[in-house]
Amino acid sequence: MENKAFEISEAELEVIKVLWKTDKPMTAQEVCDTVVNKEWKYTTASTLLSRLVEKGAVAYKKKGKSYLYYPIIKKEDYKQSQTKNLVSKLYDGSVKNLAVSLFKAGEMSADDIEEIKKMFNL
């Protein structure tokens, strides 16, 4: 998939996370019933799914009277796209500046640093 940066709201992200996690097409009602820590109505889930379809992140197929929704963007592709967006917007394209920011904010533990060193053979 190309690295298209999708603008997905937090609520839409909750919906697509459900679809990624279940790894099977779902009805709007199933998505509504599965979303964690939200008391959404069917219409809310249905609206969010429709928006994701319009954005090209989700597709559907009709089965009987129901529509079954499934993601057409991969979780890793989305994460990479959003990470590139973040680095570009906030850190002027510098991954180093992002890492320094995480380190200075105390977001990186000693274990994290050791794991990164091993990953890059440092």
Image (cartoon, helix red, strand yellow):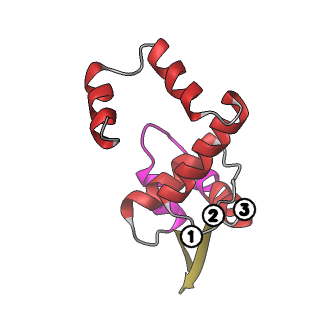
Query: For mark 3, what is the residue?
Result: 55
Q: Earlier in the sequence, mark 1 or mark 2?
A: 2
Can residue 14 be seen in this snapshot? Answer: yes
Determine the CA span between mark 1 and mark 3: 11 Å
* Residue pictured at 71% horizontal, 49% vertical: 7
Q: Quadrant of the C terminus?
A: top left
Provide the residue span drawn in magenta: 27-45
Q: Are marks 1 and 2 in contact (CB under 8 Å)?
A: yes
Given residues 70 and 26, the one toward you in this image is 70
The tag on residue 72 is 1
Counting from the top left corner in percent of width and height, residue 108 is at 38, 22
* Residue pictured at 53% horizontal, 49% vertical: 79
* Residue pictured at 53% horizontal, 56% vertical: 16
Q: Are marks 2 and 3 in contact (CB under 8 Å)?
A: yes
The kind of residue tagged 2 is: Ala
Counting from the top left corner in percent of width and height, residue 14 is at 52, 47
Quarter of the rendering containing residue 115? top left
Given residues 27 and 24, the one toward you in this image is 24
- Element assignment for label 2: loop
Q: Mark 2 packing: few (<14 Cα in 10 Å), some, or many (20+)?
A: many
Query: For mark 2, what is the residue?
Result: 57
